[in-house]
Image (cartoon, grey):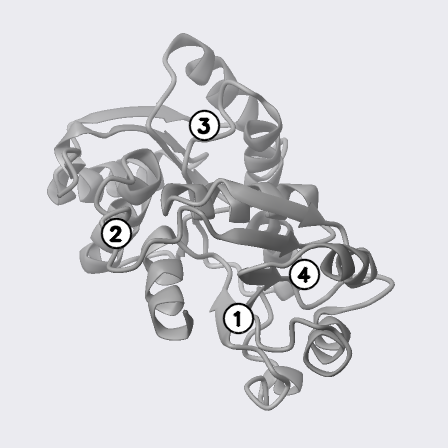
Amino acid sequence: MTTLSISDLSILLVEASTPQSKAISSTLTEAGIKNITTATSVSAALIAMEKNVPDLVFSAMYFEHGTGTDLVTIIRSHSKYAEIPFILISSEKNRDALDPVKQAGVVAILPKPFEISALKKSLFSAIDFIDPSESSSIEFDIANYNILVVDDSPLARKHIIRVLNTLGPSNIEEATDGLEATHMIEQTVFDLIVTDYHMPNMDGNELVNYIRNESNQSNVPIMMVTSDSETAQLGAIEQDGFSALCDKPFDPNTVLNLLQNII
C-alpha cells in the first residue's frame, strides 16, 4: 500500500483569475488538500517553486503572459522540477492547443468546472508518480524487461519512461522515430515496445507493420501511446497489430492495467 495520502500533498495552483483560484482552492480543500500555494502567472509560479518545491502543480491553460504549456515545458526541462506531476485545468477542446501539453507529460486534464470525483482520481494518479510503491506491487515481474520507447518528442519519451520506471523496469532504450526503431529491433530483442503514432520518417502504423511482418520479433507486445485515440484512422487499431492503446494523458495505473492484459 502507498504510504502517501492526499492530505500529505503540497500543491501549487497557478490561475490568473482570483475567483477561479478561490473556487479551485476550495475544491482542493474539500478533497483533503491542506497545503496550497497560489500563483497568477507563469513567472510567479516559477518564483514560488524556487521558494518551495511542490509535490504537484495544478495550472490553468492561459495567462496574460504565457500558457500552461509554457509552464509544463519549463518544468520538464529543469532538473530540479522535471519529476513533478502536472495537472492542467482547462476547458480547451482544440486538439492543436492541447497536444503540446499532452506531449510534455501531464497526469490529467480537468475541465472547468470539474467534479470532486475527477479531482480525486487525478490526485491518486499523481500519488502514483510521487510514491510508486502501490503500483510496483504487481502480479508479474517486469523489472528485467527490455523495453523500447519510440516517440519523436523528447519530452514525451521522458514522460513515458518516467511512468514505466514507477512500475519497475530500468532497461529502457529510446528511438526518435519508427525508422530508427527498426534498426534497433534488428540488433536487440525487446520484451515490450511502446510507440507514438504520429512520427516523421516512419509512423507508428508503419512501424508495427514492419514488426509484425518483417522483423524476427513479430510476437512482441506493442503499446501505442497517442493523444489521437478517437480519430477514425485508429478505429481498427487491433487489426493493425497493436496490443494496446493508451491515450495521453496517462498514469502508472492505466499502463499497469494495460500491461497486465497484454503481457
Label 1 – label 4 distance at C-alpha: 30 Å
Query: Residue 221, labelled with which disc?
Result: 1
Q: Which residue is drawn at 21% across and 40% down?
A: 28
Query: Residue 164, labelled with which disc?
Result: none
**Which residue is label 3 attached to?**
40
Left or right of residue 82, residue 148 in this image: right
**Which residue is label 2 attached to?**
119
Label located before the other in sequence (2 or 1): 2
Label located before the other in sequence (4 or 3): 3
Label 2 – label 4 distance at C-alpha: 24 Å
Task: Return the x and y of residue 259 as percentages of the image width and height.
Answer: 39, 65
Q: Nearer the viewer, mark 3 or mark 1?
A: 1
As shown in the figure, which amino acid type bears the numbered disc 4? Asp
Q: Can I make out residue 56 in this image? A: yes
| Residue 255 occupies quadrant | bottom left
Left or right of residue 238, residue 144 in this image: left
Secondary structure of the residue carrying tag 1 is loop
